[in-house]
Image: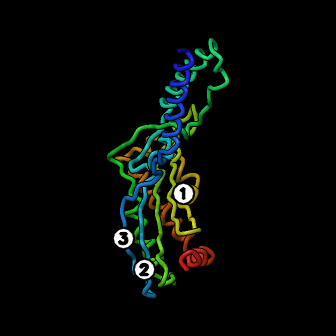
Amino acid sequence: MKFLKFFILGFSCFILIACSSKREPLPKTKTVSTDTIVLNNGSTINFITENAINGQVVEDTNNYLNIVTRGDTAQVVGVKVVQFATSLFTLNSGSISSFTKEELKGKYIESVPNKTMDILTPELYAILKKINANKNKNNTVTVQPYKFKLIYDGLTDNKYNFIYTTYIRSNNFEFVCSDKDLALDDRVKPFVDWEMNNYQLVQDVTLKAINTCMVRLKLHKNITELEKALN
């Protein structure tokens, strides 16, 4: 009788594992919008905007300004302390993971949208129209506006870092617009400066980052690489 119970239990576990292994993974991106660009040479490009989804929260797209404060760190530290204290009485003391502030969820300011596509689209369209793409190839350019965040700089000062990332991809071509397109003084400022006039400074530095990024994209070596991807 015991053998039968163990057999049924083991067989049930096997079925559950087998079923779970056949599940398709959740999609990592979601198409937000699609368009078709007609280039000057008569070829066409599918222009797609995507959001990152179903990853860890910090990997998902920030459609609105995300702010990570010291309070967010304090909450996680509190949880880690409880986990550590609990682990002292168990065998799981080695499983308590560390974290960085970049991994924190933060909070969204829904009155401050990520305007990347409003700014980027006309500039990128103008660049793409001049590309000599293959007329017989179904080409796609995908833009992924991912990061749009403010994260506290240090534990004692009141400065916050602007974190920004947008990917432009086509086949094996990848180009990144990011906060690295900004000078240090542009991306690290006191929080009181960032939050004035409903975070207008955030929108201003986003515009500056995109404009600088588009200047880089226009460099001969980058245009050459993009044309290769579209031919």
> Which one is earlier in the sequence, the residue at label 1 or at label 3?
3
Tell me: 3 left or right of 52.
Answer: right
Evaluate if marks 1 and 2 touch, with contact meaning CB atoms under 8 Å apart. no
Evaluate if marks 1 and 3 touch, with contact meaning CB atoms under 8 Å apart. no
Residue plotted at (36% across, 63% down): 33
Q: How far apart are marks 2 and 3 (CA)?
A: 10 Å
Q: Nearer the viewer, residue 98 or 89?
A: 89
Q: Which amino acid does the dot numbered 1 rest on?
A: Ser
Q: Hey, which quadrant is residue 10 in on the image?
A: top right
Q: Residue 178 carries which label?
A: 1
* Farthest-out residue, front: 1
Give residue 51's position: percent from left, percent from top: 43, 54
Give residue 53's position: percent from left, percent from top: 44, 48
Q: Can residue 226 be seen in this view?
A: yes
Q: Compared with residue 71, is residue 6 higher up or lower down, i.e. above or below?
A: above
Q: Which amino acid does the dot numbered 2 rest on?
A: Thr
Q: Which amino acid does the dot numbered 3 rest on?
A: Asp
Give residue 194's position: percent from left, percent from top: 44, 46
Q: How far apart are marks 1 and 3 (CA)?
A: 24 Å
Quarter of the figure with the C terminus:
bottom right
Evaluate if marks 2 and 3 touch, with contact meaning CB atoms under 8 Å apart. no
Residue plotted at (45% across, 80% down): 129
Q: Residue 35 carries which label?
A: 3
Q: How far apart are marks 1 and 2 (CA)?
A: 27 Å
Q: Which of 179 and 23 is in front in this view?
A: 23
Q: Which mark is residue 44?
A: 2
**SS label for mark 1:** strand
Q: Which mark is residue 99?
A: none
Discs 1/2, front: 2
* Farthest-out residue, top: 89
